Image: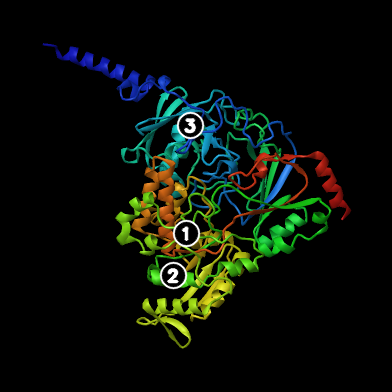
Amino acid sequence: MLGESTITSTMNRLIFIFSWLIQHIPYGVAIGIIPLAQALDYRHGYAFLKEPELPTSFIHTRYVNPDAPKGGMIRFAEMGTWDSFNSLALTGREVKGVSFWIPHDNYLYDTLMQPTLDEPAALYGNLAEGIAIDPEGGWIAFKLREGARWHDGKPITVDDVVWSFDVYRSKATPTISSPLQPFTRVEVTGPREFRFMIDEAARGDTVLARRAGLLPILPKHYWKNRDITRGTTEPPLGSGPYRVGRFSIGRWIEWERVPDWWAKDLPINRGRYNFDRIRIDYFRDDQVQTEAVKGHEVDLRFETVPPTWATGYNIPAVRKGFMHKAEFTISRPSGLWWPIFWNLEQPRFQDIRVREALWLMSDGEWSNKKSWGFWGLPTSFFHGSELAATGLPSELELKLLEPLRDKVPPRVFSEPFRLPPNQGGGWHRENLLRAAELFRQAGWVIHDDKLVHAVTGEPFNLRLVAVSPSLGGSFIPYTNKLRRLGITSNIKSPEVSNWLYRMRSGDFDGGAIWFLPDFTPTLLVSNTFHSSAADQAYSSNWSNMRDPAVDALIAHMYKARTWEEFVAATRALDRVLSWNFYFVAVMSKTKNALVWWDKFGKPDHGILNREVVFHDLWWWDEAKAQRVLEFVGDR
């Protein structure tokens, strides 16, 4: 038999060997679960349920000028204010340029991959030189590029990736942390290689690869002694094409181009980020932004106020060609533009008859006539795309809807969703009578010319909260029609931070927000409509929707294995949302109205899947800019 000292010595040696393995060999490799990372077939790109269109040998995307000159400055406007450079914090409003899920609006941090603008849902390597996906759905692997570095010159490492993931999953806002819950951990498999391990229940979710690829990576060494859960006005360390320059908190910021940005010559980045400075000024409302561009305080503006677009730019600068005015279309779904949604926490809005009555009183066709035909008339949450439900449910849709038949309105199966009847006149007697009958069935009656609850006597008053005075003004014709039913209302347009607080805290009866999906809208629909998001303090489910049928159909979107299955699940969800009248939608942003001073060069390209990304793809034209400055000086 072995003596006690021999056993102790042997155990100590085993502990030493195991400790060495843990430190020097990836855990999964050491225990034989994960194969060596070197054997993985890394690919240069990924496309959701499709194949990426650009070959491995591509040198730039198809919509850029790869030889665009660098220099100059572009100035544009944002609504409201800002008080933080940290998009993870639960408090404060982050500045434009640190957007988390929209890479084109994140100037400070590099992401593992970057999307293209002419494919529905394709990503190509940025920080990561390649991506590999487990056929069984257990992991998504990436390989970091050599030479990737922070602005202070230190290398970007797998430690930064692991640390960033842990922070996002445990300390960030729900809109960031919730979509990452299917990932259990990041496992390092080599000096530059790592894998996002996927919970068994979520394996096979084809959206997860895109979600992992879009993660911005943060510098662990910078944040090590700072509280990343709090807003900050200290310019953080980044790795992206721009760094923070001059700024005035809440009023404006200038982003400065990093001349030696490590990724400037990557194929996905050639021809992009051409301006030496990007200046963003913050304004109180739409009208001030319009006057700012006309006064050459900013260089361009996406106009969203129809009367202004129709008549407000009849000025010498436009007539003489120093300022341009054009409408652009995009290929992705146009969605819904500032639809009204109801606070479903309130018992009255939980009654579908009440919601239908309120929907019947809308008239998008009349509103569009009064708006110079500026808007599309939406019949879908995914209006203007393949994802929009049309006609009656298809066979694939019925497979998803039939098990939910007792949880969805019957008209989901029997009628295509349309706009309310009798459109175009502003209001119609038949719609008024039908709405009144629905209210009566739901227990609301007229007393002293007011709509009140038959049992409690509670008056039906609506507190509508809008993000801007222009949007609030657009509610007035609707509230005038509701007055015919005995419904009283008031409209508030508070400062943007207060508006956000009221939306998030439920201090409203009716609110409004745009719904602008892309071709992979799973994250957006989860954050906006899923029951789990209603219980999260800082989610985007401001309507507090809790609908088991909606939850089930969102799950089917995640489970889709083919594009056809994904489309079917999205269309089925569209029908259920629409026939429940959760939103009153009268507008869709089918075109983008842009006005800009003629100071820039622009690449020739076809229709893209985003709005014109001017700060990303345009460049400074010195000759044009001098011509504009001479005109402005002569006025």
The number of numbered discs placed on residues in the rendered structure image is 3
Horizontal and vertical percent for residue 429? 51, 80
Horizontal and vertical percent for residue 578? 44, 61
Question: Which SS class for mark 3?
Answer: helix
Sequence-wise first label, 2 or 3: 3
Answer above or below: position of 103 versus 441. Answer: above
Q: Residues at badges 1 and 3 in contact (C-beta under 8 Å)?
A: no
The answer to whether residue 273 is left or right of residue 123 is: right
Real-space Cα distance between discs 2 and 1?
Answer: 24 Å
Q: What amino acid is labelled 3 in the image?
A: Asp
Tell me the crowding category of disc 3: few under 14, some 14 to 19, or many 20 or more residues within 10 angstroms, Cα based: some
- The N terminus - image quarter: top left
Residue pointed to by mark 1:
504
* Protein image colouring: rainbow
Sequence-wise first label, 1 or 3: 3
Task: Pick whichever, 498 or 588, lies toward us.
Answer: 588
Q: What amino acid is labelled 1 in the image?
A: Arg
The answer to whether residue 618 is left or right of residue 28 is: right
Q: Residue sitting at 67 percent across and 65 percent down?
A: 372
Tell me the crowding category of disc 2: few under 14, some 14 to 19, or many 20 or more residues within 10 angstroms, Cα based: many
Residue 485 disc label: none
Q: Residue sitting at 58 percent across and 74 percent down?
A: 426
Horizontal and vertical percent for residue 205? 38, 40
Sequence-wise first label, 2 or 1: 2
Residue pointed to by mark 2:
356
Residue pointed to by mark 3:
160
Real-space Cα distance between discs 2 and 3?
Answer: 51 Å
Question: Which SS class for mark 1?
Answer: helix
Question: Can residue 492 be seen?
Answer: yes
Q: What amino acid is labelled 2 in the image?
A: Glu
Question: Which SS class for mark 2?
Answer: helix
